[in-house]
Image (cartoon, grey):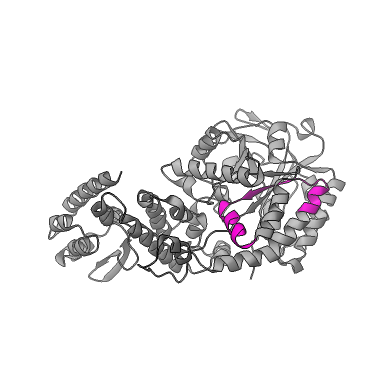
Amino acid sequence: MKPKKTAAVPTKKTEKHVEKGTETLPETKDRHAGQNVCFGFEVHQPFRLNRHFSPDPKAKKSDLPALYFDTLNKEVLERVSEKCYVPATLKILEKIDEGFRCSFSFSGTLIEQLEKWQPDVLSLFDAVARHKNTELLGQTYYHSIAGCFGDKAEFIEQAKMHTDLMYDLFKTRPTVFENTEFTFNNQIATLVKEMGYAGIFTEGVDRILGWRSPHHIYSCNDLPVLLRDVQLSDDIAFRFANQGWDKYPLRADTYAGWLSGTQGDVTNIFLDYETFGEHFWEDTGIFNFLSHLPAEMENRGVKTLLPGEVLKKYSPVGTLDVHDTISWADIEKDASAWMGNERQHTAYSAVQKAAAYAGDKSIWRYLTTSDHFYYMASKYGTCGEVHNYFSHHEAEDAFRTYMAVLADFEKRNIKVMKNRGSAKTLRTLNPEEAFHFTSPSGYIGYAAYSLDQFTDQLRVVPGDSVQYHQERDDIANWILHTLEDEKLAENVRGNKDRQELLKIINERREQLWSHLT
C-alpha cells in the first residue's frame, strides 16, 4: 500500500510590491521573461540494520558488514532498480538530451550499494551525472544526522567525503548543498558557507517565510538559500495517485499550467527519485507524466534551470533566520521525524558518544544514517503511515536492533582502546543490560542504556523509585555487575539521598570520560 497524503490544492499566487519591515519583493515581470523551474531529485538507499541481529563473539572485523546489515538491502536495491532507477533514468536521459534540466543528489551509501549489486544502474547514473543539462548536489556521504550533532566536525568530514566521491566517480565537485532530508538552521548555513558552497536547498516552510513567497532566493548567514515549493512538489510526491484528491488524475499539461502560473524568480520542485516507479507504480501513469511534462512546460514558456544557474541569475531578496531546525519531513517540517521520542533521543545521544569508541569510523558512520532514527518514530495519522511505509520493522524493534548493534560495536572496540576499564563502564548497553527504573507499583517508563543516561534520568525519576532501588541495592549491583565499576558501586551502595548519589555518580562519570578524551 502506497502512502497517501492530502493537502490543499495549489492556487496561483501573485506578487506585487509588498513591503514588510525592511524587505520588498520586486515585480516578477521586471526580473525575467517567462517562468523558471528548478528540478531536483534525491537518490538514496541506507544500509538497513539486520532485523535478526545477534552478537557473535567469533565474528571478525571483516564479518561485521554481514553481521550488522540486512540481506534485505540487496533485495530492496534490486527491486527499486527494476521499478524506478532503470526506467526513470532512461527517461531522464532522453529528456535531458532534448533540453530538460535537473539536479541529482546521490548519497554515498547508495553509490556503495550500486557498486556491489547494480553496476549497470551506476553506469546509467554516470551518464546522467556527466550530462551538460544536469548538476550534482552535495550532501553528507552517509545521508546522516551529523548536521544535528553538537560537534560539527563529523558533518564537515562527511560532506568532504561526499564531494570527493562525486569527483572520483563523475569528475565534478558539487557547488550547491542539500543536507540530509533538507535539515537546516542558522548553524548549518554558516558551516555550508564556510565549506565553500554557493548555496543550499531547504524546505519552503511557512513559519520561516511568513508572508513571503518561496519563489525567490533568500540568504541565511550570507549563504543563498533555494526553497522547495512544498505544495507543488508534494502534488507529485504524495498526491499523484490519490484518487480522493479533487485534482486526480494529475496530467502533465495541468501541472505545467500550474507552473506557468506561479510568480517569482524560480519554482523549486524537489522529489524523492523513487516517486517514479517505486512509490507510484508504472500503472499509475507516473512515467507518462514524467515523459510529457518537459514538452508541456516548454509549450507554456516554462524554462528549467540548474541550481547553479539560478544562483548566478538571481540575488537574494531577503534574509532568513532559522533558529530551530527545519526539514522536509512530516507535517511538522522539523527534526521530530528522527528525534521526536525518547527512543530516538536515546539512540541519537548514544551514537554521538560512540565516536570515542570508533578507532575505525567506517562502521560507526553507517550508524549515523538518518533512516535508522526514522524507523524508530512513533507518529500517527498520515505521518505514521508514511513512516511505516518506509520502515522495514516496527519502531520498538528498530530501536532495540539499533542499540544492540551499537553496543556490540563499542564492545568490540574496547579491546583495542588504551583505557579499557573506563570505556567498559561508559559503554552503550544492549537492551538486556539497560537499567529499568521501577517503583513498588512497577515500571515507570525510564530505561538507561549507559551511565550517562542513568545520571540524566536519576535527576528526574520519582523519589519513591530511587528509594525502592536503593533499598534493594539495585543501582550498586547494576554498576558492579553490568558496568563493572567496583569503586563506584561501593560508593553508591546504601546511599538514599538523591543529590548525594548524583554528586558521586557524576564525579565518577566525568573522571572516566577524561580518560577517553
Give above or below for 68 relative to 41: below
Indicate left or right for 496 with 436 as reference: left
Count the marks: how many?
0
Quarter occupied by the N terminus: bottom right
Q: Quadrant of the C terminus?
A: top left
Confirm whether residue 8 shows in the render: no
Residue 248, quarter of picture: bottom right
Answer whether residue 107 is magenta in the image.
yes
Compare residues 447 and 204 and report the one nearer the observer: 447
- Residue 320 visible, this angle: yes
Residue 161 placement (x, y as % from top left): 53, 44
Stretch in magenta: 93-118
Measured as percent of width and height from the top left, residue 451 is found at 27, 55
Residue 39 screen position, x and y as percent: 71, 47
Q: Residue at x 63, y 40 (%)?
A: 174
In the image, is 32 to the left or to the right of 193?
right
Is 51 covered by the magenta stretch? no
- Front position in the image: 262 or 495: 495
Q: Residue furthest right?
A: 299
Residue drawn 62% across and 32% down? 318
Left or right: 453 as drawn, with respect to 59: left
Residue at point 52% right, 58% down?
371
Instruction: Name, please, the residue furthest toward the top.
Output: 22
Left or right, 301 with respect to 512, comes to right
Is 218 drawn above or below residue 365 in the view shown? above
What x and y, as percent, mark residue 129? 70, 47
